[in-house]
Image: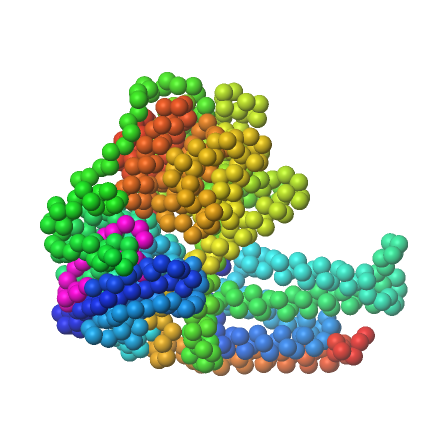
Amino acid sequence: MAPQDAAAAVRPAAVTARGWGWRHAGRTKPAVHALDLDISPGERVLLLGPSGAGKSTLLHALAGVLGDINDDGEAGDADESGSLLIDGAVPRAQRGRAGLVQQDPETQVVLSRVGDDVAFGAENLAVPRDAIWARVHEALADVGLSHLPLDHSTSALSGGQKQRLALAGILAMRPGLILLDEPTANLDPDGVLEVRDAVARCLDKTGATLVVVEHRVSVWKDLVDRIVVLQPGSAADPAVLLDGPPDRVLSDARAMLAAAGVWVPGYVPATRGRSEVPAPGTGNLLLAAEQLAVSRGRPRRKGLRRIPAVPVQEGLAAQVRAGQALAITGPNGAGKSTFALTLAGLLEPVFGKVSATLDLSRGAGIDPYNWKAEQLISRVGTVFQEPEHQFVTGKVLDELLFGPRHLGHGEDRVDELLERLRLTQLVDANPYTLSGGEKRRLSVATVLAASPQVLVLDEPTFGQDANTWAELASFLSELLDAGTAVVSVTHDAEFTAALGGVELRMAATEAVAP
Amino acid sequence: MRQELTLAGNRALLARANPLSKFGAVLLITAVLALSIDWVSASVALVFELLLFPLAGLTLTLLWQRGWPLILAAAVGGWSTSILAPDSGRILLDVGIWTMSQGSLQLGIGFLLRGFAIALPAVLLMSCTDPTDLADALAQKARLPHRFVLGTLAAMRLVGLMAEEWQTIGMARRARGVGSRGSVGQRVKATLGQSFGLLVQAIRRASRLAVTMEARGFGGGNRTWARESTFSALDLGVVAGGVVMAGLSLAAALAAGTWNMVWLGS
């Protein structure tokens, strides 16, 4: 099918909201209250606002997926008021009119082969078989994945590729409205640009309407022609706080947006600086790794022989020193997290060793991997990328007390951490119900409650708003000044700069498919 | 582990047959073998099944990797039958409470062979059938509800992810001070906690996947199929092969006089 046919086939959609509101089942406060908004066909809108302003709710409603299942997997009786229409009709009644790409790349893939996955949406819209495959080829070309064979495994794709595949799956439905809910929040910088550019190409070709939710304004600013800022709904305030061309909104409301945690272009939030950045090589040595080979795989046994896992990186060396920041950087797939988790005593080295000095081990032995769990947490604390992986209780307060109770000391530190990381109001809340920023702060606090001398963080700033980012950077610089060693795996150059210290750049190991 | 469960690059003849016809043939063979505990019908079927290996692109190594739990189960079953079944004929082994007689050994070998002969067709079927093709055939030819079939197929993809997530959650919990080493009690407790963590993540993933599928129009009434599930002459051959294998196994056992219906006792 020639491209112009495809363009002709897409009819850009119009969105109209009149006093629209939505309250999730089981909540007392509405997620969106009294929203009035008009989006004309072909407009490209960036939706901004603090967390809790209802951005995702609006996107889900437009995609026609609101109501049956909410984010917590609950079904139930939610409340809708006013009207929200696409081309004058309810979104639910128009399957395929809008296409949605969400944040987590893993759950954007439905089927195991690339071609089948792109075809899935078109099949559901009952497109004839021959037309489906024409659409599949075209959509894959549009997102820059046409070099992949149709039976390529979807599990073998990178995060950026998965998000582009999801976009292709939506394009194959020929939607008039493309909805993107933080599509690049989980991606490394290269992946972000890949996805952004693919979106730009597709919009130029089809002329579809776009609504995108994203914290990082600079990524989307030049692609959109309108920015709408939402605020948490209440009876007194309108849901739309600001609305206009990007440059005007950004200049009028720069300070306000920055205060709300939006990543305004050219804005790096102020953070507490180190009182004095120690020279490299100074500070007490706590952990050392030499000639280290790392892998997530476990050794296999063949008869009596032990076959070591295939390392993702070899010949690694690092020194972790008190009061020093160590940033592990490098492209995706280089094994940064694997290296950090090995340093943290959570993965067994394939070859080589990680040694703790006497200052750190305090009688627990030289190899952190062999420490007991309670020996580990008071020496090396690790904050995982996904905070939920580390929640072990049902209450914020219990979560913080968990480490100290196991150790039998340190409960007095909990109040200070609650205060410092602004969690005091949330002590009785269930950790799983917190916002993204709150979960991040909690996961850092829980690990620090055991007072480790070394703190290891895996992508601590991924998907965080500017406020959480600044709080985190400032807090870590305080810890560094107090003599804690901080190891962070990160793509975030500004974060690395804010902490100062040594950067360990890891090279890509093998060629991952482009 | 994921690699072993896929058919990447299996270009064998049986991989091209429709999953439903293969399923039918397997059903026939297992039905006949399930009726009797004799070693003749089981060995005849087993010989045929081994001959089918190259046609399904299966090797002994792959068989072990994919089917070792079944193979072990058949071996254990055979062993315990031969020592525990009522004795008849000459006593071959007598170790206190355990005795193995000619009669019980025969029964045990019959049990072992039967176990293999019943397990192998399933392994053969798995090794040359793509889950997506199976889903297509079940929905298009067997007319099972497509919501159910495709929902299951999409969920299966998450199983591989869950294996990785299990490892990550284990490490994340150790970093919180939950020991996965130590006494048996501590390990059981840690595993339960970890399972709960995995369950939470599985539900989150599943509900996000459900949103993804729904946003792509899944769940409506009419849908078309990009891949048509078809029957060909090959499928006729597959079903006929199944009939022949089942028939020959039965005939051989009857001719040898070993046919021994399970519910008639021995």
| Image-quadrant location for residue A484 | top left
> Residue B257 appears at what percent x and percent y?
77, 79
Magenta residues span: A37-57
Can see residue A333? yes
Picture residue at 24% right of the left edge, 66% below the top: A19
Image spot of residue A183 (x, y percent): 29, 54
Locate residue A327: give its quadrant: top left
Residue lying furthest front: A236
Q: Is residue A499 magenta?
A: no
In the foreground, A427 or B32: A427
x%, y% of residue A247? Answer: 11, 49
Q: Residue A137: where, in percent of width, then height?
A: 25, 66
User: Could you tell me how many numbered marks the image carries?
Assistant: 0
Task: Indicate the quadrant containing the N terminus of chain A: top left, top right, bottom left or bottom right.
Answer: bottom left
Q: Residue at x 29, y 37 (%)?
A: A470
Image side of residue B108 versus residue A127, left or right: right
User: Front-most of B32 and A514?
Assistant: A514
Question: Is any part of residue B171 visible from this angle?
Answer: no
Render colour scheme: rainbow
Question: Is residue A438 rendered to the left or right of residue B189?
Answer: left
Q: In the image, what residue occupies the spot 36% across and 37% down?
A: A489
Residue in the image at 79% along x and 63% along y? B82
Residue A51 among those drawn in magenta: yes
Q: Residue A496 versus residue A9: which sits nearer the camera?
A: A496
Residue A503, quarter of picture: top left
Relative depth, front residue between A13 and A172:
A13
Q: Is residue A47 left or right of residue B190?
A: left
